[in-house]
Image (cartoon, grey):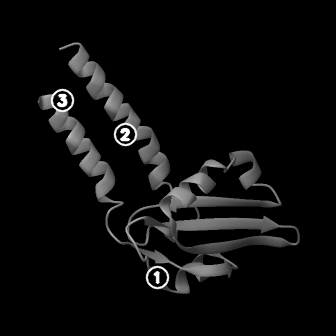
């Protein structure tokens, strides 16, 4: 019973950020991160959407920033395609996702990257803790 309680708690904590409709900074092809943030905000249409920042590098153009709401599964798919080596090269297009209000303010949103590491570790810890008790 105790194991089920801990797993339920972790699932609630994990999905509580995703279940709320969020507000995100929004812009298309902004010349800088600051200008993009000053362009305004948008409220996502559904609980399955998340905030994102997409950084595009093209020849003769330093960087362009696009921000807004995106389906969380699409965003995660795009973010998983990022490669640290190619994100800093020209041409490239890299997407960063996050799940809290106005979390896409910085150049790179790291919330989901951190959660992708922490929650599997928590599940492993809980599993092995109850295996040896």
Determine which residue is flagged by label 1. Answer: 42
- Which residue extends farthest top? 132
Image mark count? 3
Q: Quadrant of residue 43?
A: bottom left
**SS at circle 1:** strand
- Which residue extends farthest left? 1
**SS at circle 3:** helix
Q: Residues within 10 Å of mark 3 (few under 14, many from 20)?
A: few
2 and 3 marks in contact (CB < 8 Å): no
Q: Residues within 10 Å of mark 1 (few under 14, many from 20)?
A: some
Q: Quadrant of residue 94?
A: bottom right
**95, above or below 69, in the image:** above
Mark on residue 116?
Answer: none
Q: Percent x, y for residue 37?
A: 54, 79
**47, above or below 30, in the image:** above
**91, above or below 60, in the image:** above
Q: Is residue 47 left or right of residue 132?
A: right
Please indicate, yes or no, whether residue 109 appears anywhere in the rendered image.
no
Please indicate, yes or no, whether residue 82 appears anywhere in the rendered image.
yes
**SS at circle 2:** helix
Task: Identify the residue at image location x=43%, y=76%.
Answer: 44
**23, above or below 112, in the image:** below
Mark whose residue sits in front, 2 or 3: 3
Q: Percent x, y for residue 28?
A: 65, 80
Task: Identify the residue at image location x=38%, y=32%.
Answer: 121
**Foreground residue, 44 or 86?**
44
Closer to the chain start, of discs 2 and 3, is 3
Determine which residue is flagged by label 2. Answer: 119
- Which residue extends farthest bottom? 39
Q: Quadrant of residue 87?
A: bottom right
Mark on residue 3?
Answer: 3
């Amino acid at each position: 019973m105790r194991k089920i309680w801990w797993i339920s708690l972790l699932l609630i904590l994990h999905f509580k950020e995703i279940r709320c409709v969020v507000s995100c900074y929004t812009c298309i092809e902004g010349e800088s991160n600051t200008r993009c943030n000053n362009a305004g905000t948008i409220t996502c249409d559904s609980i399955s959407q998340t905030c994102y920042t997409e950084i595009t590098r093209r020849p003769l153009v330093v960087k362009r920033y696009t921000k807004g709401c995106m389906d969380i599964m699409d965003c995660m798919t795009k973010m998983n395609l990022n490669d640290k080596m190619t994100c800093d090269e020209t041409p490239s297009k890299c997407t960063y996702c996050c799940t809290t209000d106005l979390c896409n303010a910085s150049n790179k949103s790291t919330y989901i990257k951190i959660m992708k590491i922490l929650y599997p570790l928590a599940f492993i810890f809980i599993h092995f803790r109850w295996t040896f008790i």
